[in-house]
Image (cartoon, rainbow, N blue to C red):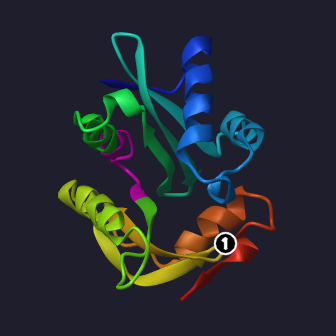
Amino acid sequence: MILNDSPAKENMKKLKALYKRAFPRAEKKPFLLIKRLAKQGKMKIYSAEENGKFLGLAIMILHSDIALLDYLAIEESSRNLGVGGKVVEALKEIYKDKRLLLEIEDTGKDIPEREMRLRRKKFYLSHGLTVMPYKICLFGVDMEVLTYGGDVSFEDYHAVYSSTLPKRIPKKISLI
């Protein structure tokens, strides 16, 4: 399995289609914005591939010494085969000189889909990520912040968004 930061046109179409299917509308950035920011070097779009076959995607936001895993999705036919773990391990290697950061939905008590959220958290913890001692509200959704390669303060976390994305986005992120 490789992470390709220059997917072939056919795999880029599959990547975009998976992006549209895998994430709720409220959580998606316009794909044209992602492509524009990737051209500017502020984001990176990866296609997970094996022998030319598209398996999934990873989209990163890059700022200073921080690489934020903004989106990770695996094709339905490739799930539960270890592909997601291989992607996380590859990202850890690619960004070994940076602090890797990601958000997951809050795993607190009495929430919808708690079991799925706990499985997702366990997955990332099994790959060496640690939970930061703060939570954030991202567009009205409570999130936990996980890191690899060093702690990330809320101020550094917020700087990733404020230095990269349109001003309206960081305004919708707060410390809980």
Q: How many numbered marks have been drawn onto this rendered protein structure?
A: 1
| Image location of residue 23, percent across then percent down | 56, 49
Q: Nearer the viewer, residue 117 or 133?
A: 117
For residue 139, side relative to residue 145 (left or right): right
Identify the residue shown where x is 66% and y is 37%: 38
The residue under the point 77% across, 37% down is 32
For residue 93: magenta?
Answer: yes
x and y, in percent, of residue 25 in the image: 67, 53
Q: Is residue 164 left or right of residue 84?
A: right
Q: Residues within 10 Å of mark 1 (few under 14, many from 20)?
A: some
Q: Nearer the viewer, residue 38 or 80?
A: 80
Q: Residue furthest bottom?
A: 176
The residue that appears at 37% across and 39% down in the rendered structure is: 94
In this orientation, does residue 8 appear?
no
| Residues drawn in magenta | 91-100
Q: Which residue is mark 1?
A: 139
